[in-house]
Amino acid sequence: MFNSEQTPTGYSVDQDPWSMIEKSLLKVAATFIAAIIVFSIIITSCKRENEERIPRGFAFGIDVSENNGDIDWAKVAHQKKTNDPIRFVIIRSSMGKNGLDTCYARNYTEAKQQGFIVGTYHYYRPNENSNQQFENFKKVLKLERGDLMPVVDIEVNPKVQSMESMKIGLRNFVNLVEKEYGVKPIIYTKLSMWRDYLQNDFSDCLVWISAYSNYRREDDIVKNANIHQFSDRIRDIPGIPSKYVDGDDCRDLKPLIY
């Protein structure tokens, strides 16, 4: 038995069956388009991970820490996975006033044995004393002629002091490195931090800029950077246990050599 609102087919009297079909088709089409977009994003991401080529004539390098596991540097030296051969490696040694990277000494020694140009970086903690951080860096830093200049990694904004105060501490760290080793350290930082806070006060230092994706290569700061960290998704390098490793390129290594 039907009520006054329904027809024998089960549709309410003011509904058009063809309208409902059209709506269903639109939903299917929208789902299909969304799937294509997601697939395109995945393909683009994979290309960024494994297939992005550095500019012609640039040197390709990686940076590593204990977070990448126990690296087999012989396998890394002979790997054919990346489009360009790895020429330089920058290795974390220390963090803040008392943090030490447990893999640093072995990574430094074994990477050099395989013929890589090697550099060392200290992860600078903006809320800790710069003198203590330098002493922590100094006690473990291995630096020989032919290495890359020392690096200080500053990528986090301060929480317990002002940016101006943090910059005073960073300048003190730079000066201590220069006094001890005769060169200013290379500054590693994010594109936004360099642009917004550091470039005017540290223009006397060489700079290593972190800025991912190809379109950022067109930024003037990235173009003029001494090193460009272009990816954190270099994938499945033989000899490196971690799934991903950071990828870097350098227009000219000579000015960076100690």
Image (cartoon, helix red, strand yellow):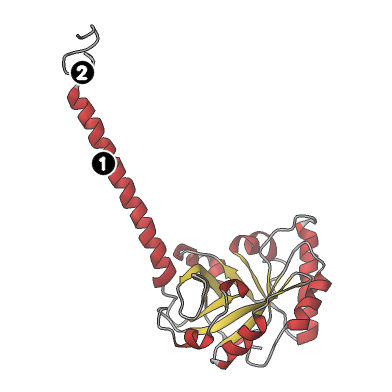
Quadrant the N terminus occupies: top left
The residue beneath circle 1 is 29
Residue 80 as seen in the image, left or right of residue 163: left
Q: Secondary structure at mark 1?
A: helix
Image coords of residue 55 (percent x, y): 44, 76
Q: CA distance from mark 1 to mark 2?
A: 26 Å
Q: Quadrant of residue 159?
A: bottom right
The disc at residue 10 is 2
Residue 152 as seen in the image, left or right of residue 235: right
Residue 32 as seen in the image, left or right of residue 44: left
Can the viewer see residue 96? yes
User: Which amino acid type is shown beneath numbered disc 2?
Assistant: Gly
The tag earlier along the polypeptide, 1 or 2, is: 2
Structural crowding at the residue carrying mark 2, measured as other residues with C-alpha within 10 Å and reported as few (<14), some (14–19) or many (≥20): few
Write the residue at 34% across / 56% down. 40
Q: Quadrant of residue 160?
A: bottom right
The vertical placement of 258 against 121, above or below, is below
User: Which amino acid type is shown beneath numbered disc 1?
Assistant: Ala
Q: Secondary structure at mark 2?
A: loop
